[in-house]
């Protein structure tokens, strides 16, 4: 969160605190910042707006997080819609980075980005079901950063790898700051990306989807 956004958040919390005859101290604000740091300021502001129009008490950090995250089914459906929109917009050739590691984990577990983009309508019916189940499980359990790929390689990157060229920049899908935080992990050895690319080579992915 940028400094001006944290200042805006403090002003908002200070105003809400006064409405509820409370005081917003620096120590309390640090707790709010710690809890809300994974979310964008737009998500936080929307959650506060929803809370103050439906509740008449002082919000707790857990209340705002609950609104942002929604139910497990809601999050899985929202993630699926984001994925399908990206498939239609970018296709199998682009390497993509979503703003949600749970999406990366679910797609990787189901064969990767290239395989997804090549599925038929009939195959997609079952893929959607499997994706939502995997994503909900991820949301509930969570995993370490080494258990999901930092990017989902596309055909162009596979072709560059095969020819010995460096990969190009990935396509960003979703919140840019969250994508950047996820992709900055490229400096670590990403075995999940390597295994996805090796599997795509074994399956002849460069030949399966016509250029």
Image: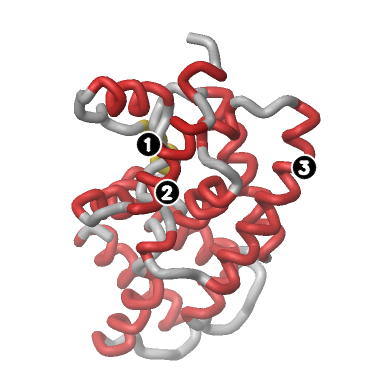
Q: Earlier in the sequence, mark 2 or mark 1?
A: 2
> Disc 1, disc 3: CB below 8 Å?
no
| Residue indicated by mark 1 | 172
| Residue indicated by mark 3 | 126
Q: Where residue 72 sits in the image (x, y, percent)?
A: 67, 64
Residue appearing at x 25%, y 54% in the figure: 189
In this view, the residue in front, 195 or 63, is: 195
Residue appearing at x 41%, y 82% in the figure: 18
In the depicted structure, whether residue 45 falls above or below residue 21: above
Q: Dot 1 lies on which element?
A: strand
Residue 125 lies in quadrant: top right
> Disc 2, disc 1: CB below 8 Å?
yes
Residue appearing at x 25%, y 66% in the figure: 7
Q: Earlier in the sequence, mark 3 or mark 2?
A: 2
Q: Where residue 191 sits in the image (x, y, percent)?
A: 35, 53
Q: Dot 2 lies on which element?
A: loop
Q: Quadrant of the N terminus?
A: bottom left
State which mark lies toward you, 1 or 3. 3
Label 1 and label 3: CA atoms lie apart by 26 Å
| Residue indicated by mark 2 | 99
Going by the image, does 88 lie left or right of 156? right
Label 2 and label 1: CA atoms lie apart by 8 Å
């Amino acid at each position: 969160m940028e400094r001006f956004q944290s200042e805006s958040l403090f002003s908002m919390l200070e105003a809400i605190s006064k409405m509820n005859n409370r005081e917003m101290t620096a120590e309390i604000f640090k707790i709010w910042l710690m809890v809300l740091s994974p979310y964008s300021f737009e998500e936080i502001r929307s959650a506060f707006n929803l809370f103050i129009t439906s509740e008449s008490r002082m919000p707790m950090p857990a209340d705002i997080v609950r609104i942002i995250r929604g139910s497990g089914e809601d999050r899985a459906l929202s993630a699926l819609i984001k994925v399908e929109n990206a498939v239609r917009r970018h296709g199998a050739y682009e390497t993509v980075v979503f703003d949600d590691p749970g999406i990366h984990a679910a797609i990787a577990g189901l064969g990767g980005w290239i395989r997804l983009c090549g599925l038929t309508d009939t195959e997609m019916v079952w893929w959607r079901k499997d994706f939502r189940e995997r994503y909900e499980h991820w949301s509930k359990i969570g995993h370490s950063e080494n258990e999901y790929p930092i990017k989902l390689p596309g055909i162009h990157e596979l072709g560059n790898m095969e020819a010995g060229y460096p990969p190009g920049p990935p396509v960003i899908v979703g919140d840019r700051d969250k994508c950047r935080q996820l992709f900055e992990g490229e400096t670590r050895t990403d075995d999940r990306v390597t295994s996805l690319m090796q599997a795509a080579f074994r399956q002849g992915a460069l030949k399966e989807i016509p250029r």
